[in-house]
Image (spheres, rainbow, N blue to C red):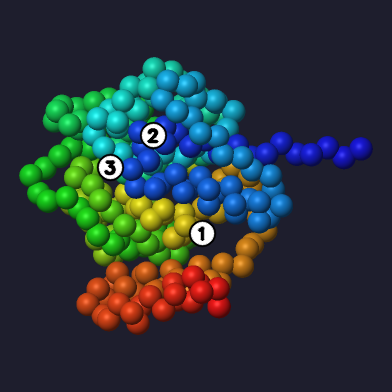
Amino acid sequence: MSTVPEPVSIALLYPELLGTYGDGGNATVLAQRLRWRNIPAEVVDVHAGEPIPSSCQIYVMGGGEDAPQALAARELRSGSALVDAVAGGAAVLAVCAGLQVLGNRFAGEDGKAHDGLGLLDCETHRDDGPRRVGEVVVTPDPSLDLPDLTGYENHGGVTTIGPDAQPLGRVVVGHGNDGGDGTEGIVNDRVVGTYLHGPVLARNPALADHLLTSVLGALDPLDDGEVDALRKERLHAARHPHMHMPQLTSGWRRLLRGN
């Protein structure tokens, strides 16, 4: 008698605190790309005040405002479930505020430094410059074997990564970490931090599969032809922002019409 395999569990951490920019969609993308491969998957919403399960294979954190971000950090530091899960082989995607919380320290709305979880070797502070807002193009670190990444950033923090830390990639368009070294994001084994919204995994399915394979091993390929065509438009639009937009968005219109 055959048994039904246990679904891959994807934890979406504190969506009411770290869900300002729609980054919860990253959990949906991960689950759907597994289901397309006939691998059962479930998304587990973990709300503030609830215990974080340490048995999930992937954890997703999004962006948020200063006060909710500080609360999320306190919640995470109150236990060791996420740290234990990573030590046990789980992967994490942390976007914007999530990236900052997983670092060593980050600046709160009061301007004071708050302790992070230390899963990523970085620190975030504020400066007097304008917010970093707009389209971003990133060439990933060669060791990741990923195509160029596309996304949208909206952050006031400046993140400096440690001297031995691995960035997610190098900025081609936009600001990224904006610590003066041209880096975007930070990677520590199966923990990936980035400033890219979008959601980033909807725009970059290869990054989604990178996270999935880091915990599940090799996966069957999927036909991402339509997504690839739309990615090319987003990458082209970011690199050539003054071109006529209707010309650049024809692929999106075709997809919405279903042809």
CA gap, disc 3 and disc 1:
24 Å
Question: Residue at (44%, 75%) from the top-left corner?
Answer: 253
| Residue occupying the far front of the picture | 257
Q: Amino acid at mark 2?
A: Glu
Labels 2 and 3: the sequence-earlier one: 2
Q: Position of residue 170 (x, y in %)?
A: 31, 58
User: Residue at the spot x=26%, y=37% of the render?
Assistant: 65
CA gap, disc 2 to disc 1?
27 Å
As drawn, the residue found furthest toward the right would be: 1
Name the amino acid, label 3: Ile
Q: Which mark is residue 161?
A: 3
Identify the residue shown where x is 19% and y is 27%. 113
Where is residue 194? Give x, y as percent: 35, 48
State the SS at label 3. Answer: strand
Q: Which mark is residue 14?
A: none
Q: Residues within 10 Å of mark 2 (few under 14, many from 20)?
A: some
Residue tagged by mark 1?
A: 206
Residue position for label 2: 16
Query: Residue 41 vs residue 184: left or right?
Result: right
Q: Is residue 87 left or right of residue 98?
A: right
2 or 1: tag closer to the N-terminus: 2
Q: Position of residue 159 (x, y in %)?
A: 24, 43
- In this view, the mark in front (2 or 3): 2
Nearest the viewer among 204 and 87 is 204
Q: Mark 3 Cα within 10 Å, few/some/many (few <14, many 20+)? A: many
Instruction: Name the element at disc 2.
Output: loop
